[in-house]
Each structure stands twice: as C-alpha cells, then as structure tokens.
Image (tube, helix red, strand yellow):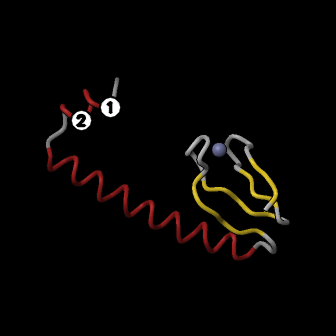
Amino acid sequence: MDGQTMAESLSEQELAKRVLRAEQRLDCMETTLAAVTDEIDGVSLSSRCSKCEKSLLLIKDGILYCPNCGDGHSL
Ligand SMILES: [Zn+2]
C-alpha cells in the first residue's frame, strides 16, 4: 500500500492522533539516544546522513560515519 492511499483512508482526526503519538515517541527516542551516547566515551551525534537520510551520523574517534549505509569520512 502506498502512503497516499493509506492517508486517504484515515480521518484527519485519526491522522492527527497518529502524528502526535509519533512525535512523542520520537522525543522519547531522542532523549534516550542522547543519554546513551553521553554514556559512551568519544562518541557523539551529528546531523542526519545526507546520503541515505535514514540515520544520524555518529562521530567516533574523529571519524564521522553513518551506521546505516556506512558512508563516512574523517573530520
Ligand atoms: Zn547513511
């Protein structure tokens, strides 16, 4: 099923509820992820991968890399 068909079958109210729930889950994930990376020495988060756009880039030991597509380079 493509995204448009699915959106049309849902009421606006139901969609709004879903978006709100997704945002809350995202906030929760971001808070957890930031705390986890804080716990790991030498690892921090960067911007979203410009190649696959499916993950944030990680910075580890001076190397910037994407855990999803493996794209990366040294800083
Ligand atoms: Zn990537």
Query: Total marks drawn?
Result: 2
Vertical comparison of 14 with 56: above or below: above
For the point 82% across and 57% down, the residue is: 74
The picture places residue 3, in percent across and down from the top left corner, at 32, 31
For the point 69% across and 40% down, the residue is: 69
User: Could you say whether the residue bearing mark 1 is in a helix, strand or loop?
Assistant: helix
Q: Is residue 19 left or right of residue 28?
A: left
As drawn, the label of residue 61 is none
Tag 2: Cα neighbours inside 10 Å, few (<14), some, or many (≥20)?
few
The picture places residue 29, in percent across and down from the top left corner, at 52, 63
User: Where on the picture, by quarter, is residue 59?
Assistant: bottom right
The picture places residue 17, in percent across and down from the top left corner, at 23, 54
Tag 1: Cα neighbours inside 10 Å, few (<14), some, or many (≥20)?
few
* Labels 1 and 2 touching (C-beta < 8 A): yes
Tag 1: residue type?
Gly
Q: Which residue is mark 1?
A: 3
Vertical comparison of 1 with 49: above or below: above
The picture places residue 71, in percent across and down from the top left corner, at 73, 44
As drawn, the label of residue 7 is 2
For the point 80% across and 63% down, the residue is: 60
Image quadrant where one finds the C terminus: bottom right
User: Where on the picture, by quarter, is residue 26?
Assistant: bottom left
Q: Residue furthest top?
A: 1
